[in-house]
Image (cartoon, helix red, strand yellow):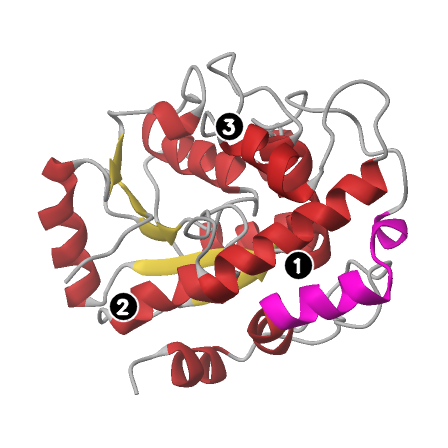
Amino acid sequence: MSFPGTWMTESGSMIYRVVPKCACSTIGQIMYYSDHGRFFDGDIHDATEGLHKWGIEASQPTITQAVRAGKTFTYTCVRNPYARILSSFFDKICGIQRNGRRYRGNLVPLLIQKYGIEVEGDFDQIASFRRFLLFARDTIRWRRPMDPDIHWSAMSSHISTFIANGGRYDHIFFTERFNEGMQTVLEETETPHQVDLANVPRFNESEGHGPKRAHPVEDYFDDLALHLVNEIYHRDFELFKYDRLDPSNKMPVGEIDLDEVHAKLGPD
């Protein structure tokens, strides 16, 4: 069994399947606080202690045992696909990362050369984003000119690996209703330290990496962009109940059916 992207508190109170660009920094910090009574000093993705992570080899047997036992409250969080792919563009393509460099080294030069995007100065955000969307579609549909990146891979793809390897979610909630969804997690778990969500800051580690979005979300999506987003994320819209036709409506239009998610994302 393999559970990539899975985090668990050291106390064993909860298991979380990370979905990039879906409040994962804030969730990780809440998990850390619930065990230690303080937030991690830095980006929670860099933490190598205080939290079990599948990426830490020593944590893998502990996570596997907990998932197999099926007694630990397990959850994940999703986000409107239109807002998520936009956030990926501004953070990972336009932004300078926390190491002071462009994301993935030669990725942005490749996009400039092959797709004609711009990321410097007062560039046309809408035109560059739509060209990036073509690139994202190419990586997901044909795995070229590279494999899809975790930040724009479909949420259903991330979430399905946990189910396919024998895990089951007790709760999937919306980034757009974060406090409500995270409060359910805290009410269903016993943690060493109590978390007051009203006083938890938002740990948006990508904020400030790139330029500010200059237009409303819907302005970035013409007919072709709408088609591409629906082609790439059709399962996300279907399973996580977002409006696939209206990018201006960031809120979910229904409630997530956990049985449907497990049936459609589980092994055939």
Q: Secondary structure at mark 2?
A: loop
Classify 236 as above or below 56. below
Q: Which region is colored magenta?
A: 217-232
Q: Which label's residue is closer to the chain start, 1 or 3?
A: 1
Left or right: residue 196 compared with residue 115: left
| Residue 164 located left or right of residue 226 | left
**Element type where label 3 sits in the image:** loop
Amino acid under disc 1:
Pro
User: Which residue carries the number 1 mark?
Assistant: 81
As helix, strand or loop, the secondary structure at mark 1 comes to helix
Give neighbour class at mark 2: few <14, some 14-19, many 20+ (Cα, 10 Å): many
Amino acid identity at mark 3: Tyr
Position of the C terminus by quadrant: bottom left
Residue occupying the far top of the picture: 100
Q: Nearer the viewer, mark 1 or mark 3?
A: 3
Q: Which residue is mark 3?
A: 103
**Label 1 crowd bin: few (<14), some (14–19), many (20+), radius 10 Å:** many
216 magenta-colored = no
Q: Report the residue at 40% width, 38% height from top.
A: 31
Q: Nearer the viewer, residue 22 or 147?
A: 147
Q: Is residue 233 left or right of residue 41?
A: right
Frontmost residue, 233 versus 165: 233
Q: Nearer the viewer, mark 3 or mark 2?
A: 3
Circle 2 or circle 1, nearest the eye: 1
From what the image shows, is residue 262 above or below residue 157?
Answer: below
Residue closest to the eye, 103 or 40: 103
Label 2 – label 1 distance at C-alpha = 24 Å
Upstream in the sequence, badge 3 or badge 2?
Answer: 3
Circle on res. 167:
2
